Image (cartoon, rainbow, N blue to C red):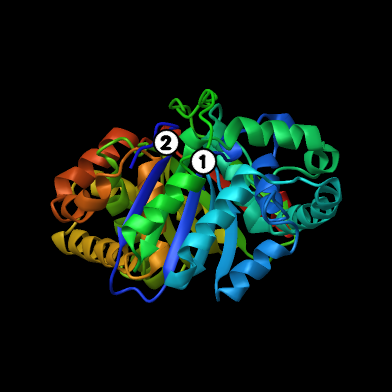
């Protein structure tokens, strides 16, 4: 349901469910941040549950716990998500809790100061993890201009110096009804729950929608970076730009990534791990959203095999483009993707997430079409996808090798 204030609500009544999930998507994330705000979306996510107008500090968590529930949140590039998982009798109170927390956070200075230490510690752990650093660096390589290159975790400098005024301004700008999707899944009285959503979310005041960030990444020449660190093995992210979620090419992209590196039956695993024994592990993924998508391969390997691995990845992609792909490879990928899709509709939270995500991306029709789109895809679709999006000269890679290998590169 679309409200006059721009809010969207989706109520999914599942009579077989023993639990319920209330999920609120807010379309704000790393992509909305300037460099001087790096990590602010994530920081506000930490503060939202630290006290609100009707639920002062400590009362919110206890209220959810008394109902036998679970409350959590996370931030990503394009949105921030807040959730309560609860038994069905707690749905209405959980809606009130989420609405007040999101609309009326207190942002007490004492809580801001305390949470700064928590988030700064998270940032430190993040940058102590070589794989996290490598993935972040890969994003900055594959996305040269678009906001998709922004870091979710942000920087210590920004979090240390951020003021309450800046926090409040950012919240006021982005936490608006036009940028929210409320999804509730479970066994409940739809009319009663609708009344509560109407009262506590539908009453949000309509505000000016801020302009979207730069989502589109132009095709650019590939970049190859090799870094060295305190690691014993080699690590690599290697990939190319793909379609955004508005494109019908996303289905072929999913299949392509799965055929290449989706499990132990995939092409890359069979050739590089089982036949050549030159990687310890290898997998590939397709990620997308409103921003330009990306197909990438992630692998762990012995450093001396780096060049052979790169060449073999290119070779396997080019083999598919040349038509060297079996129907059984496509069928395996279809089965894996469809099975995973169906599993994601077994649990209340997963159902809420699926609906909320595609509504947020303005592609709600995908929920009904997805399985058929995958089932009806052909080898020709996969070949056309790679022909359209892949080019050896635009393939980028970021590698992390042990420091002992510096002299060789």
Please indicate, yes or no, whether residue 311 appears anywhere in the rendered image. Answer: no
Q: Which of 101 and 43 is in front in this view?
A: 101
Tell me the distance, in whole angstroms, between the alpha carbons under discs 1 and 2.
Answer: 8 Å
Spot occupied by residue 346 in the image (x, y as percentages of width and height): 33, 70
- How many numbered marks are there? 2
Taking 260 as reference, is 180 left or right? right
Which residue is more in the foreground, 87 or 295? 87
Q: Quadrant of residue 50?
A: bottom right
Q: Which of 99 and 327 is in front in this view?
A: 99
In the rendered image, the vertical position of residue 260 relative to residue 394, given as above or below: below
Element under disc 2: loop
User: x, y (%) of residue 136?
Assistant: 61, 46
Q: Which of marks 1 and 2 is nearer the N terminus?
A: 1
Tell me the tag on residue 290. Answer: 2
Q: Can residue 289 be seen in this view?
A: yes
Does the CB distance between marks 1 and 2 fall below 8 Å? yes
Q: Which residue is drawn at 25% across and 62% down?
A: 338
* Element assignment for label 1: loop
| Quadrant (top left, top right, bottom left, bottom right) of the N terminus | top left
| Residue 383 percent coordinates (x, y) | 22, 43
Residue occupying image coordinates x 82% and y 36%: 163
Q: How crowded is mark 1: few (under 14 residues within 10 Å), some or many (20 or more)?
A: many
According to the picture, the residue beneath numbered tag 1 turns out to be 78
């Amino acid at each position: 349901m679309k409200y006059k204030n721009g809010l969207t609500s989706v109520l999914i009544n599942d009579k077989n469910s023993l639990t319920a999930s209330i999920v609120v998507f807010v379309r704000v994330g790393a992509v909305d941040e300037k460099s001087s705000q790096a990590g602010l979306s994530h920081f506000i996510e930490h503060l939202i549950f630290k006290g609100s107008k009707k639920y002062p500090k400590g009362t919110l968590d206890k209220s959810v716990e008394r109902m036998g529930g679970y409350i959590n949140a996370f931030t990503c590039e394009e949105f921030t998500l807040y959730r309560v998982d609860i038994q069905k009798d707690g749905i209405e109170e959980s809606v009130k809790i989420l609405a007040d927390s999101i609309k009326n956070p207190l942002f007490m200075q004492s809580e801001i100061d305390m949470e700064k230490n928590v988030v700064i510690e998270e940032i430190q752990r993040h940058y102590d993890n070589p794989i996290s650093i490598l993935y972040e660096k890969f994003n900055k390589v594959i996305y040269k201009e678009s906001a998709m290159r922004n870091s979710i975790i942000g920087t210590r400098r920004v979090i240390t110096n951020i003021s309450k005024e800046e926090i409040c301004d950012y919240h006021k700008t982005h936490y608006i009804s036009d940028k929210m999707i409320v999804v509730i899944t479970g066994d409940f009285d739809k009319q009663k729950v609708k009344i509560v959503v109407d009262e506590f979310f539908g009453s949000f005041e309509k505000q000016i929608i801020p302009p979207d960030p730069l989502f589109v990444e132009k095709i650019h020449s590939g970049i190859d970076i090799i870094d060295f660190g305190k690691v014993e093995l080699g690590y690599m992210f290697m990939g190319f730009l793909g379609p955004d979620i508005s494109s019908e090419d996303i289905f072929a992209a999913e299949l392509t990534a799965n055929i290449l590196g989706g499990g132990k039956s995939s092409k890359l695993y069979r050739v590089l791990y089982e036949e050549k024994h030159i990687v310890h592990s290898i997998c590939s993924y397709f990620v997308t959203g409103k921003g330009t998508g990306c197909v990438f391969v992630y692998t762990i390997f012995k450093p001396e095999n780096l060049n052979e691995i790169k060449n073999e990845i290119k070779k396997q992609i080019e083999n598919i483009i040349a038509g060297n792909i079996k129907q059984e490879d496509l069928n395996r990928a279809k089965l894996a993707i469809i099975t995973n899709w169906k599993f994601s509709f077994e649990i209340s939270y997963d159902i809420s997430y699926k609906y909320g995500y595609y509504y947020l991306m303005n592609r709600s029709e995908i929920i009904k079409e997805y399985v058929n789109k995958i089932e009806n895809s052909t080898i020709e679709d996969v070949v056309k996808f790679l022909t359209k999006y892949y080019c050896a000269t635009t393939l980028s890679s970021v590698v992390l090798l042990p420091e002992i290998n510096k002299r060789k590169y």
